[in-house]
Image (cartoon, helix red, strand yellow):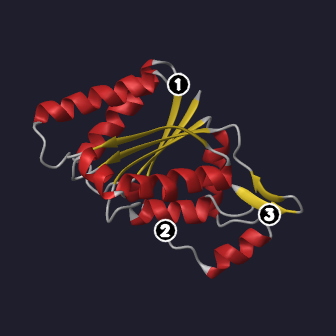
Amino acid sequence: MNHLVIYSHPNPKSFNHAILEAYTAALAEQGHDVCVRDLYAMDFDPVLSADDLVMAKRKEYAPDVQAEQEKVQWADVVTMIRPVWWGGLTSNLRGYIDRVFISGFAYAYGPGGLQQLLKGKKAVIINTMGESYEAYDKSGMLKSMTQTIDECLSGFTGLDIVRHLYLGNVVGCPDQERISMLEQVKAMAAQLG
C-alpha cells in the first residue's frame, strides 16, 4: 500500500518526531511504500490566497499545491501526525488542508450536491496532547475535535478515517509511558496493511 504521512511539528527532537519515526519504520517493515511530507522542513506556505481560489475554480493549482495533490492521489492511506495546539490543528497543517484539499480536487459541488472526490482512500490521525485524554474528554474537546476535524474532513472529501489516536499527557508523563505510546503507534501501523 502507498502511505502518505503529513507531519506537522517544528522540533525534529520532539516526541511527535519519535512518533513519525516509529510509525513510518513499522510501515516500511511491512513492505509499504511511504512518503513523508514534513511541513515545517518543507517550509510549506499555508496561506490560502485569492489566487488559489480563482485558480481552483478553473481546476488549476499552484505548483506546490499540485505536487502535494499528486501525492494524495498516489496514496491509499493518508496519515496526519501533529500536536493539538489551541484545541485544533497546527497552523501549517490547517493551511495544507485549505490549499491541498481544496474544492475541485478533494470535493466539489454538482447538480446532485456534494461530491466526495477522495472516496476509497483511508486516513489515520495521530495527535499528541499536553493534558490527559480524560481531561480532553471531560471538557468536550475530544468531541469538538472529532467533529471539526474527522467528521468535516471525511464528510467533505470521502476519506475513510479508520483511526484517530489521541495520545494524552505527553508533556508530563514518565518516559516509560512515552515508550508505551510508541509501541501503540507501531501496533496501529501493523494493523493497516
Q: Identify the residue shown where x is 65% and y is 63%.
A: 102
**Circle 1: residue type:** His
- Classify residue 124 as left or right of residue 180: right
Q: Return the residue at label 3.
A: 109
Contact between labelled residues 1 and 2, with CB atoms less than 8 Å apart: no
Instruction: Pick whichever of labels 2 and 3 is earlier in the sequence.
Output: 2
Please identify, in this view, whether the residue under mark 3 or under mark 1 is nearer the observer: 3
Q: Identify the residue shown where x is 73% and y is 73%.
A: 55
Give the Cα separation between the discs numbered 3 and 1: 34 Å
Secondary structure under tag 1 reads loop
- Classify residue 104 as left or right of residue 22: right
- Classify residue 104 as left or right of residue 137: right
Q: Residue furthest top?
A: 30
State which quadrant residue 90 falls in: bottom left
- Please tell me which residue lies in front, 140 or 193: 140
Secondary structure under tag 3 reads strand
State which quadrant residue 28 falls in: top left
Q: Return the residue at label 1.
A: 32
Give the Cα separation between the discs numbered 2 and 1: 29 Å
Quick one: label 2, few (<14), some, or many (20+) residues within 10 Å? some
| Label placed on residue 45 | 2
Secondary structure under tag 2 reads loop
Instruction: Pick whichever of labels 2 and 1 is earlier in the sequence.
Output: 1
Q: Residue furthest front?
A: 138
Give the Cα separation between the discs numbered 2 and 3: 26 Å
| Label placed on residue 141 | none
Contact between labelled residues 3 and 2, with CB atoms less than 8 Å apart: no
Q: Which percent across, then down, holds residue 27?
A: 45, 26
Residue 51 visible, this orientation: yes
Which quadrant is home to the N terminus? top right
State which quadrant residue 115 falls in: bottom right
Q: Is residue 41 above or below residue 54?
A: above
